[in-house]
Image: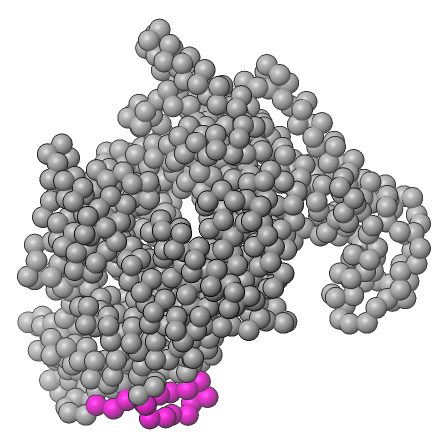
Amino acid sequence: MSSDVLHGTPEVIEKGTGGFAAEARQRHLTNFSGFGPPDLVCISKHWRGVVGKGVTQGYFHFVRGIKAENTASISTYLGRLIKHGLEGASWYSGGGYKIVSAACRSYNSFSKCDIVVKVDVPGSVSSIALFPDGHEEETSELIWKEAFVCSVLRASEGVGEYPLYPCLVVFQPLDSLLDEKNFLVAASEIISRWPLVGSGRPGLVFGDNPSAVTPATCLVAEALFRYFAQDSRFEQAQKFFEIEVGGKDVELKYFACRALKELGNFSSARSLIDTVVQECPSSSAALVMSSQLYLETGQLDAAFIEAKKAVQVNEKDTLAWIHLANLYVEKGDLVESLIALNAAIMEPPALDPFLRELLPARKRMTKPLPNTSGGTDIIRVLAKRLHEERIGPATGVDESLAELSATLMTDPEKQAYQVLVKALNKFGWDEILNARSDAFIMEADISHLSEEQETSTEQVHETDEEKKQEAASSSHEHAESSVDSVAYSSPETKYSEVHSSPGKDPSSSAEANGTEGQTENVAAKENQVQENDFSSVKEDKVREVGGSSEQRILKNKQMSLEVYSSRGHKKKMCTPWLDFLVNNMYEDLRALAIWQAEDEQMAQNLRNTSGTSTSNTSAQTNQASSSALNNQNATSSQTSQRQNGDSHISQSLDAEQIAKQTKRPPVDWLRRGELARRIQRSSDAERAFRIAIILSSKNAGAEKSATVSPWLSLLEMYAEDGFASEALVAADAVWNFMDSHADRVSTSSFTPPVPAVRRAIFKLVHKHGLHKIREQVMDKRITINRHRIQSVLLDAVEWKVSGYDR
């Protein structure tokens, strides 16, 4: 007798005969974006008891990495499931299960349909293309090429991990260079259909007048470049985009320029991008790349010319506006930088209604025996663990760290946020607020106009002086409660000032220099500007205009305001997303201030306990911090060095000392590390992650203890900065966790490497060369599993990672 548990594969148990997941997928087929969700596998199992007719039960799970090249490739996976069969039932079972059919649905994002392959037991296989309206077509050669490209790019993009789809099984779709060759050939043969998948550059297709998507600006091209870049295979990327597809569309050579830039070959990249710009003068992507190359070589004026051309030829290109804002920060013009950011279009985050509908079904799942999945569970185990660690325990955590809004930013918002962080480190928090006040009108400051204009159908009169005073008062209250109001009190830390420049010790500054008074003066200046804004509201009549109510109100607002900046430019409305980013920065700085106050208190306690030695060390550290702060307005090169080297948190205590004194759980330090990384405080981030690791090791049995998350973060940081030995130790720690929590292939003594480990080691090979990394692996001073790391280095040679031959 057999149980209903599929050998090595967990499943969600459906109600009755099943069909719920397939029906939900069919309903949401038109809502799928990008490359769609992972493949859905539905299995029907028949229960037959000792007596009676029996019943049929439905089950489903998700798969990523099936090479959807043809009917045979998908049916092979289904046949393997049937062949491995079901686990044995208990001896007292009154009956058993058997598989009667299995079906796989793989999304084709080019043709917007599902490829459905069904296997009936015994003996029949069928495949169709099922469209959203329910009609079916035979699978053609073109549809299979599209499905093949989609399946590989889904795996490369990590679809189904964040958020995690239930019972996700993951394979590597391309096992050899021959498989990759077939994939790239299929992709190049359908290049004319790439734009059907959608845009790969944010802002182009958002709004009422979307820009035309070309092969170079589509998601497929971006995903193909990331396919090479995430494994540091830039030579292959250059060859593919310059030779194999660049001849069909010249603009695609832009990606070859990106590869050359990553390889440090700026002269070849400049020559190639000049050709692309000459033949495609309306390509904003190519113009931005040209500007970036000028910036890399120190030609700021030329970079500005190209960046301004980019936003002129395509004002919807969000990345072009972000790059222009970054150039203005380099130039030292913060106001213009904010204006450029404000012009960018930010799309709202995409939702997944299909996954949301499936989530309640996760309550009933099968549990296969351990050590039976053959390594297909590593992604599911890691993703689930990372999610649990970031949530943390139910009690004892700092909710203010858990609720930081910056953790909700989309990828384009993160890029814009980094421009603000760069401005923060160069100019300071006060200057950002002053520049925002000089550049924009805030929505909340004129929100009263909406109510007045909605109630009026013909005319709006603004002649009552009391209304002006009321508006100014409302603006003053808003300034005190918004991100501009930076004075606050914390009962935990007795810390009441974050309005100073990042890195400044606000508590000591307030005592010595009266920083609170300075803060009040800044707020008063902003309120004065806002009052002047309202005093300039026209008192003449404003006629209604046609259109919808929302459009009329917005237009009336802008027409009714004649507010000018200090440069004589008419102020624009600050977009909600930019205001959101500034608010995120305020929250981050407030959390950073609390962190700094706690560290200072710990250092003071240690000085009181240890005596003069620790006091001298602390004095030297404070002197170094003071020296760094005195250079706050130095040149941009000095600023860059300070960002990468100096800490804005007291470093008189190391991770071990803080771990002994802190009462915070590991998840708080994990979140502080992520906060420090977000605002480019690398040394603070490293120390916070190490504190989380130390605390987790002391509570190894604690549920959801932050064990693997800080190691993964350290791995990314060390690999990005080129610290080889530290990155290898972090990679080994992550691998140790996976060996103890995930299944391995029966023929191997360790689990397969998760993508993060593989990519980090490949990045080290790219930065230092294979020979040097091999020397680091064999270094006796570090304790790692050398056999495992060497297996990844062999992969680096096989797949010709950049640097494998040196």
Vertical placement of residue 74 versus 204, above or below: below
Q: Residue at x 47, y 63 (%)?
A: 275
Q: Residue at x 70, y 41 (%)?
A: 437
Compared with residue 565, is residue 800 higher up or lower down, i.e. above or below? below
**Nearest the camera: 637 or 555?**
637
- The colour scheme used to paint the residues is one colour
- How many numbered discs sit on the rendered protein? 0
Residue 236 in percent (x, y) is at 28, 62
Does residue 438 appear in the picture of this structure?
A: yes
Q: Residue 787, how many percent across, how many down?
A: 9, 48
User: Looking at the image, which residue is at 37% across and 10% down?
Assistant: 616
Along the line of sight, which residue is nearer the eye, 427 or 554?
A: 427
Q: Is residue 133 magenta?
A: yes
Q: Residue at x 15, y 65 (%)?
A: 373
Residue 357 in the image: x percent, y percent?
Answer: 42, 71
Q: Give the residues drawn in magenta, as a range.
A: 125-140
Q: Is residue 521 left or right of residue 686?
A: right
